[in-house]
Amino acid sequence: MLKKVDSVEEFNQLVGTESKFFLLKHSLTCPISHAAYKEYEKYANEHQDIPTYYLAVQEARPLSNEIAAKFQIKHESPQVILFSGGAASWNASHWKITNSALVNAKMDTQ
């Protein structure tokens, strides 16, 4: 199940409490982002062993910018980041966000 994150505070709490999780930076107006969201949603429904979160870039720009700066990952939208042990361990953007890519990322970081 996808859970929405809106603030820097919520995100920092996730980093502090979740050992591993995915986060999707999602644009509400971009068709590529919509396709990525569907792939992400499919992954989340089929693989509930790793929590899945998302943010809407238009609604949470400060959070999106904070993540880019703190983890030194160039902002893109759509973009999925796998966080593990408080660090960003993998990321993908645009058409590279697929159910199989997410499965592989999870396997590669175990």
Image: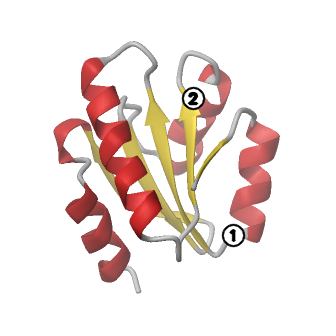
State the separation of the CA atoms marked 1 and 2.
21 Å
- 103 up-or-down from 14: above or below: below
List the residue tagged with mark 2: 65
Residue drawn at (78%, 45%) of the image:
10
> Residue extending furthest bottom?
110
Q: In which quarter of the image is the N terminus?
A: bottom right
Q: Is residue 52 above or below residue 103?
A: above
- Estimate the x, y position of residue 3 in percent, counting from the top left: 64, 47
Reading the image, the residue beneath label 1 is 18
Identity, as a three-letter code, of the amino acid under mark 1: Glu
Q: Where is residue 6 in the image (x, y as percent from the top left)?
A: 71, 33
Quarter of the image that includes the C terminus: bottom left
Q: In this view, does 74 lie to the left or right of 15?
A: left
Question: Disc 1 on helix, strand or loop?
Answer: loop
Which quadrant would residue 107 be assigned to in this image?
bottom left
**Left or right: where 50 falls relative to 100:** right
